[in-house]
Amino acid sequence: MKTFLLSTAIALTATAAFADYPERPVRLIVGFSAGGGTDTSARGFGSFAAEAPSMNGMPMVIVNQPGGSGLQAAQTVAEADADGYTLYIINNGTLSGSSLSTPEAEFDPRESLVNLGCVTQLVTGLQIPAEHPAQTAAEWVEMVRDSGETVRWSTSGAATMHAVVGHLFMNANGIDHQVVPFRGGSNARNALVADDVTASFNGNQLVSGFEDDIRVLGVPSLERDPANPDVPTFAEQGLDALNVTGPMCLYGPVGLPDEVMEDVSAAVAAVVELEGFGRFMGRSGLAAMHLTPEDGAENLNRLMETFEPVIAEIAAAQE
């Protein structure tokens, strides 16, 4: 009887401990410096999180911890107390690329983190100079193949989601190519504007303000990007779809109490529906978009499987 009473008391204490979650501000860790797509998404979400009923009016405080293409921050959150006060935000494409390209870290996000839902997405675009005569991705493919030249293309890093899309696209369409990776999407964009490269595979949100210099020919998603609805998918143009996008998701350490996961997931769903959040993301060239924790986890698993052979190919080429 004493054992039963003790177990019951412990269970009631644990339930009470999380009944009023959160009771203080929640840290939302960003694995990159301020100003990028992940940081922008985090600050947008953090600005409106307190309006979600499940957050008890508590804000999310953004903490930047750059390093290892987001992997260091991911490890920090994975090792944090599973109390819901230290969370992580990253797009699944980057999370897949950084973990697969750093095997020595022995970090599998599917085992170390739990998905809490997604609030927007980063979409890669095939970007070319605005004055190029090709009007579609299919036309561009035909023209560069006929030229017989090796296409030099820029991207935001050697093993980012954008880089993987570039390799997949070039290989699928039989194009001789050479990747020119930069540190960050802005630098990759600037190389295209300066005509240092023929094309770029980069985040479409970075084209904002450069429309006179850059034209986006297509995207590797199954449906058009809500933030750029005029850009057709590759599949619409008769090319391989690829089916790669990077949902921007919140994560917590494995072991979070069910009540906390439910509260944060409910906050994600609520914030995405707020007009203010939609306007905030729109000003950044992104669109509010919700994925449930289950769909976000499924997306990560599919990206990990898609990226693994490409990352291995990239690593072998660098040896």
Image (cartoon, grey):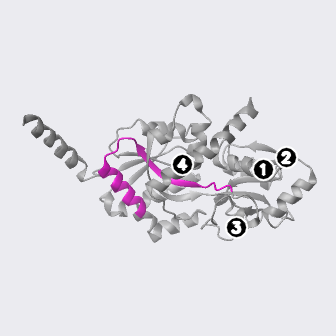
Residue 158 appears anywhere in the view: no
Type of amino acid under label 2: Asp
Circle 2 residue? 176
Disc 4 and disc 3: Cα gap in Å? 24 Å
* Residue plotted at (45% across, 37% down): 76
User: Position of 156 compared to 264: left or right?
Assistant: right
Q: Earlier in the sequence, mark 2 or mark 4?
A: 2
Q: Which residues are magenta?
A: 242-269
- Vertical arrangement, residue 89 with respect to residue 319, above or below: below
Type of amino acid under label 4: Leu
Disc 2 and disc 4: Cα gap in Å? 29 Å
Circle 1 residue? 170
How packed mark 4 is, by other alpha carbons closer than 10 Å (few <14, some 14-19, many 20 or more), is: many
Residue 171 appears anywhere in the view: yes
Q: Give yes or no for contact between labels 2 and 4 (Cβ–Cβ under 8 Å).
A: no
Disc 1 and disc 3: Cα gap in Å? 19 Å
Circle 4 residue? 300
Q: Earlier in the sequence, mark 2 or mark 3?
A: 2
Dot 2 falls on a residue whose secondary structure is: loop
Nearer the observer: mark 4 or 3; the answer is: 4
Dot 4 falls on a residue whose secondary structure is: helix
In the picture, the quarter occupied by the N terminus is: top left
User: Position of 203 compared to 2: left or right?
Assistant: right
74 vs 299, nearest the viewer: 299
Circle 3 residue? 231
